[in-house]
Amino acid sequence: MDTASRKYKLAMYLCLIGAIGFGLYVRLRNIDATGLWLDEAFSVSVSDPQNGFFDVYRTTLSDVHPPFYQILLWTYYQAVGFGEHTGRYLSAVIGVLLIPSVFLLGRKLFDEQVGLIVAWLAAVNSFLVQYSQETRSYALLSLLTVLSFVIFLRCLSRGRGQDFFCYWLTSAALINTHYFGYLPVFAQVLVLLHMILRSEVHSQVIYRFICAGFFAALTVIPGLSYAESSFSRDFWIQPPETVFFFKVFLLYFGDTFLAALLAVILISGLASMAQNPESAIACRLIVFWGVVGIVVPYVCSVYLRPVTTQRNFIFLLPAVLLVAAYAVGNIRDVPVKVLMLVVLMTFSATPLFRDISYLRDPENPYSRETHMRDIVISVMNKSSVLPIYSLDAIQFGVYFKLLGSPLLVSNLEKLKTDLSLPSHPKEFYVLETNYGPGFAQGIKNLERYEAKIIDKEEIGHVRLFKIRTFEP
């Protein structure tokens, strides 16, 4: 390697290290500025290190989701300790690992320049940063999606046994992290089938892919009965509205101008990619990735069962950033290319550096705050200790535990049982959030127990009711 090549490699890796370092900074910045929200509290509760391995496994599957992330979080808690924000640091590390991963994918599909551009776009993307600061599985979903495509391409190009072993591990982890993890794998299957029809794949490679897929499928068999039971019950997700995917695209970038600019860049990039024979494989892979990722959930949501939530589509964002990076990388005029990157980076970073108060506003789409922490502290500071009930007893219960309180929270079924007893509680608290059907909707049911609300405290999206029972 000559001196010029060494300097180029050094500059490239320094630029990548810069993206990783900046991505780490923005993911750790304000990571503990807000309390846990409802779903985070559930994840923390399920992966409580005092729970057994099979308890974590069964509870996660019973709540619809596959178990890999919760088991990983449980293992992490066993190693580093159990705390309110501890799990967010695991997500931050996972989010940072996405940056070199998209670099590898961009370099594999196109070249090193595209890899660096997409690495920086991923480093500052507010949507990716947001879910790298949550104790939830979405950062892991995006990372495993990208890694699965990187290893998939290596299997096609090299065909080594260790590559297929890594592909099996990654695919198994992906489909056991989130049900949307099946979609990238399905897209890869379609790409492979297309290549088989065009006689572009050796029979040995096909055989190894079949083996990897078979063993990955075996990992989900133990949870099939749980999954069938979970999907047969009612769920809160609604069918997608007409503008659903426009809203997802806007949320990806957190800024209307940036989203509009990237829509133009995306169209330009796809058109350029389709016309370039050297980018045929990359174009095919990204289009399959996008079409499968949009059409399958949409059809399922409209005709079978709604599954579309905006955060579930985080696994498509790396594909969008790849096309944008390719389009910017194809700009031949260097000053124009640099200016375009400056615009993209500036507007991408803006949501990350606003005043910290925007994180605490529960009406802000980028806020994670529901003020569960505040309402729990309020209960802890009450002079009288009363029984506590909630529809979200698991989430509120773990919050009391995280804050060092011995107070326990029972579910509403327990409340009904307790009120029917001769020694029923004279006064008690009920906690609720905006995410459930609402305790207030069931107030009429309290009348037969001669119980009435005597006090109400509301903070953000959570409420505390004080209830008193009266003798008939």
Image (cartoon, rainbow, N blue to C red):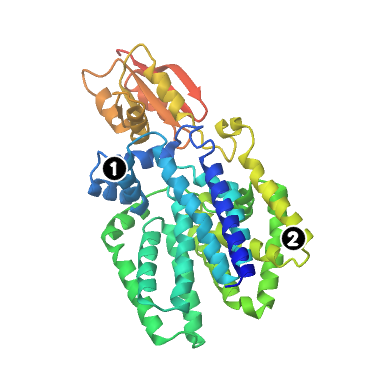
In the image, what residue occupies the spot 48% across and 78% down?
157
Within 10 angstroms of label 2, few (less than 14), some, or many (20 or more) residues?
some
Q: Left or right: 280 with respect to 457?
A: right
Q: Measured from the top left, where is residue 440 in percent x and y?
A: 44, 28
Q: Which residue is mark 1?
A: 78
The local secondary structure at tag 2 comes to helix
In the image, what residue occupies the spot 30% across and 39% down?
48
Q: Measured from the top left, where is residue 37 in percent x and y?
A: 46, 36
Residue at the front extreme of this rendering = 3
Within 10 angstroms of label 1, few (less than 14), some, or many (20 or more) residues?
some
The local secondary structure at tag 1 comes to helix
3D distance between C-alphas at marks 1 and 2: 47 Å
Quarter of the image with the C terminus is top left
Give the residue type at disc 2: Lys
Q: Which residue is mark 2?
A: 337
In the image, what residue occupies the spot 38% across and 14% down?
382
Q: Left or right: 256 with respect to 15?
A: right
Name above or below for residue 462 compared with residue 178.
above
Give the residue type at disc 1: Gln
Q: Left or right: 461 with respect to 391?
A: right
Query: What is the tally of numbered marks visible in this picture?
Result: 2
N-terminal-most mark, 1 or 2: 1
Residue at the left extreme of this rendering = 422
Q: Measured from the top left, where is residue 203 in percent x and y?
A: 40, 86
Name above or below for residue 389 compared with residue 382.
below
Q: Quadrant of residue 468?
A: top left
> Visible in this render: residue 461?
yes
Q: Quadrant of residue 189?
A: bottom left
In the image, what residue occupies the spot 24% across and 48% down?
53
Nearest to the observer: residue 348 or residue 472? 348
Q: Quadrant of residue 162?
A: bottom left
